[in-house]
Amino acid sequence: MAGERRAAGRAGPERRTALGVLRFAARRLAFAVVSVAAVVVITFLLVHAAPGEPMLGTPERTLVPPETIARQRALFGLGRPLAEQFVRYAGNLARGELGESFVLHRPVADVLRDALPNTLLLGGTALVVSLLLGVAVGALQAARHRSRTDSVLGAAALVLYSVPVFWLGLLLLLVFGERLHWLPMGGMTTPGGDAGLSWPRHALDVARHLVLPAASLALVQAAAVARFQRSALLECLGAEYVRAARAKGLSERAVLLRHALRGALAPTLTLAGLSVPYFLAGSVLVESIFGWPGLGRVTYDAIFARDYNVITAVALVSGILVAVGNLLADVAVAVADPRVRLDR
Amino acid sequence: MSPWRAAARRFRRNRPAVAGAAVVIALALAAALGPLVTPDPLAQPDPVRLQDQPPSAAHLLGTDPYSRDVLSRTLHGARVSLLVGVGAALLAVTLGAGVGLAAGLGGRRTDELLMRGVDVALALPRIILLLVIFAVWEQAPAGAVVVLIAATGWFQTSRIVRAVVLSLREADFVAAARALGARRPGIVRRHLLPHVAAPVIVSASLDVGNIILLEAGLSYLGLGVRPPTPTWGNMIMDGKDVLFSAPWVALAPGCALVLTVLAFNLAGDGLRDALDPRVAA
């Protein structure tokens, strides 16, 4: 394997040096910046293309004090020509000024700062669990290809893949929260018990609250990973380098774990990077069910309240997170897989 | 035997796929005919005494918090899910195939421009953008849901179609047709489109399930197709508030969703295996 990798490096169009990987990363970073800029422009245009003028809808007029609306309209230059509004909007963004939440009566930037870490904890946990579970199930299926185990796991994965994540969340809440009382029904900590707890107990408390929302998100995604991982592995198991490893006399277990799995891991890493939008959208649907105080809950409340500044800011933050996810996946794949060409 | 008939035979031998296709047909019939015999899904016969009734002979799946019949709303909801799912998937692959053909057959600059655009579009958070659109566009008609889901869902198909066209453009049988004096539109229609059709059909059929889930997620948030029109998503939203006291309100539309999406995925997997024997596992 090591010899193969060196040979690929020499023969490749660009030597696989640290500098090469860095150059590749820089190009992908430029692409990420372009896609974030696209999100900014598209969100701006969408909000302005929609019928009705922003911040003058019925809910705003009845619920928000007129001074707040006047202040926000001045901040964003509403009523001015579109180009001028965009320049103002971009300038505000550059200064980190995202406007004020109509419902929470706080700067949007503060709301996001409080909510984002909780969503990263939930989404990160779900991402890791879905990868571990999905890769393990997919590998087991590929190893026992066409066996009973394979078909049972395959059927289970297909059913889970067809379940709406918010409905799964409601089911888990109903069964494990309400009927069995195994796990807390919602929130991030036990109310009132927060102040006096030492940190390990606090961490355990948060972890218990994390189980159900993270499981809702992770199970559905694990099904997608398993389906993907199984077919990627089956493809690798037929590849020449795997046949070579077999011919060397390695055990089937070593062939699978050390050689085939390695080749199949790169597309799975890409899938993980691409799944960031799924976890973001999933958190909008799931956090509100479990009262998890994250970005998704903020978005959910903002949608129902037409909290305009929050909605656009969330779109922007999502665009950034998605771009970062793609970037990390690209770089991880380039580092892990010697077959990736760096000059593209 | 023509490749299409061979594919049909492979599909028929795949029992899960046939079962999926049968369920899809049954669902389409239920959605079309069921509402003719069930009560009005909007009727609130007695909002006080008949709310959240458990399943009974009068209401086979019970009633919801507004005393509406859950079975009849579930059948009506099937119409929205199936129409949006199938309609948006067809529109999306048509767009994707058009752009893919244009990129594959057009000049280098056209190709470069289109595919760079697709690269950026694929990197955008689709669902979040749809949330923003429907959150600001409160009175969006049902047609807009179909169009916008399709307009944000054709990028992958265009890449696949372009790759097929590029690989075939220089193929021997195309060169032979050209040498025999065939014109370009004829070559595209007779030689390229049949090869493009298989991956397009596969990606459309695998898309339907995802689009149905996407629409359900949107209407669960009260976006897209709006209440009081029953959709499985907004029925689950109604059921969420009475989850512990009247779980059937959320269970019925949820089970309908899982069954429908599962049926489309089974049929889609079967079509993929039948039309592309190389990847059949």
Image (cartoon, coloured by chain):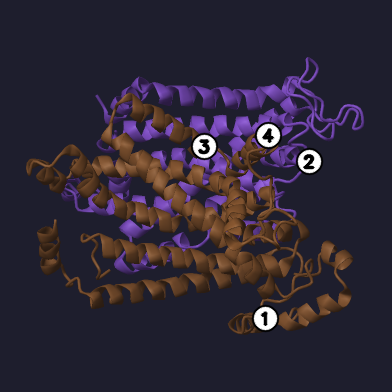
Instruction: State whether discs 1 and 3 lie on one chain.
Output: yes
Q: Rate crowding at label 4 as few (under 14), some (14 to 19) or many (20 or more) other CA atoms within 10 Å.
A: many
Where in the figure is residue A194, as x and y percent of width and height?
69, 60
Residue that sits furthest to the top in the current view: B57
Instruction: State whether discs 1 and 4 lie on one chain.
Output: no
**Nearest the camera: A309 or B10?**
A309
Q: Rate crowding at label 1 as few (under 14), some (14 to 19) or many (20 or more) other CA atoms within 10 Å.
A: some
Q: Which residue is mark 3?
A: A162
Q: Which residue is mark 2?
A: B228
Instruction: Give the amino acid type for the residue marked by disc 3 in the picture.
Output: Ser
Where in the figure is residue A276, as x and y percent of width and height?
49, 58
Q: Residue at x 39, y 39 (%)?
A: B202
Q: CA distance from mark 2 to mark 1?
A: 37 Å
Q: Which residue is mark 1?
A: A85
Q: Residue at x 17, y 45 (%)?
A: A239
Left or right of A41: which side holds B39? right
Asked if marks 3 and 4 touch (Cβ < 8 Å), the reply is no
Q: CA distance from mark 2 to mark 4?
A: 11 Å
Instruction: Give the amino acid type for the residue marked by disc 1 in the picture.
Output: Gln
Q: Is residue B211 above or below residue B26?
A: below
Where in the figure is residue B251, as x and y percent of width and height?
67, 31
The chain drawn purple is chain what? B
**Nearest the camera: B51 or B256?**
B51
Instruction: State whether discs 2 and 4 lie on one chain.
Output: yes
| Tag nearer the camera, 1 or 3 | 3
Q: Could you say whether the residue bearing mark 4 is in a helix, strand or loop?
A: helix
Tell me which chain the residue with mark 4 is part of: B
Query: Could you tell me if residue A297 is visible in this image?
Result: yes
